[in-house]
Image: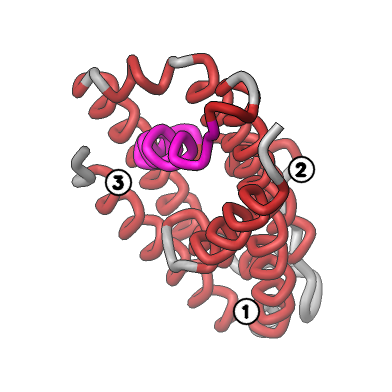
Amino acid sequence: MLPFDTLLAFFGIAVLLALTPGPDNLFVLMQSAMWGRAAGMLVVLGLCTGLLGHTAAVAVGLAAVFAASPAAFTALKLAGAAYLAWLAWQAWRAPPEAGGPGRVEPLPRAALYRRGIIMNLTNPKVLLFFFAFLPQFTRPAAGPVAWQIVELGAAFIVATLLVFGAIAFFSGAFGQLLRRSPAAQRWLNRAAALVFVGLALRLATATR
């Protein structure tokens, strides 16, 4: 097991990284603004589930195989870009919700949770980041490296859950104000679509 001071230092760095503007926290912000706090939290849980997959890949050595394959990197990033482009199209076409001020019909819970998982797992930069970052905090005297990777991944997930959860909470509250007006809601949907397009282009043009 890793020493407590090592885990604490890693956790602090993970919090700072989660606060740094990037595709995932921007994705949470827009989904929460569009669909509400609860929806945003489901997306956050999906993203954290994706981080479990990345942690497991590093722990068992799959990340090393992926890092050595340019074709796998390209295929995964293009799949992620296509998914974001599809979300952009859905957001652009979404009509303002009827039924009174502030009313919004969220997507099914499973769909929101699945969005977070897909968003995270189809971003090869996250896997390569974990592959390069987590092993730096392992210690030869702290036991099996695979278990240390799991500990570090868990700490990173907790940091992500706290920071992204706060983003979902506050952006959901702001989005609720915007959804009181059909015109504002229409512009919110358009803004979300443009953000998703930007994320898709960024991912599609990402390099190793």
The crowd level at tag 2 (other Cα within 10 Å; few <14, some 14-19, many 20+) is few
Q: Secondary structure at mark 3?
A: helix
Residue 38 in the image, given as x and y percentages of width and height = 79, 58
Q: Give the mark count.
A: 3
Q: What residue do we see at 73% from left, 36% from top?
A: 110
Give the residue drawn at x 70%, y 69%. Answer: 166
Cα distance between the residues tagged 2 and 1:
24 Å
Residue that numbered label 1 is attached to: 182
Q: Picture quarter containing residue 163?
A: bottom right
Is 24 magenta? The answer is no
- Which mark is nearer the camera, 2 or 1? 2
Q: Amino acid at mark 2?
A: Arg
Q: Which residue is mark 3?
A: 203
Q: CA distance from mark 3 to mark 2?
A: 26 Å
Q: Answer above or below: position of 91 versus 65.
A: below
Q: In the rendered view of the protein, which quadrant contains the N terminus?
A: top right
Report the magenta residues as a range.
Answer: 121-139
- Main SS category, magenta section: helix
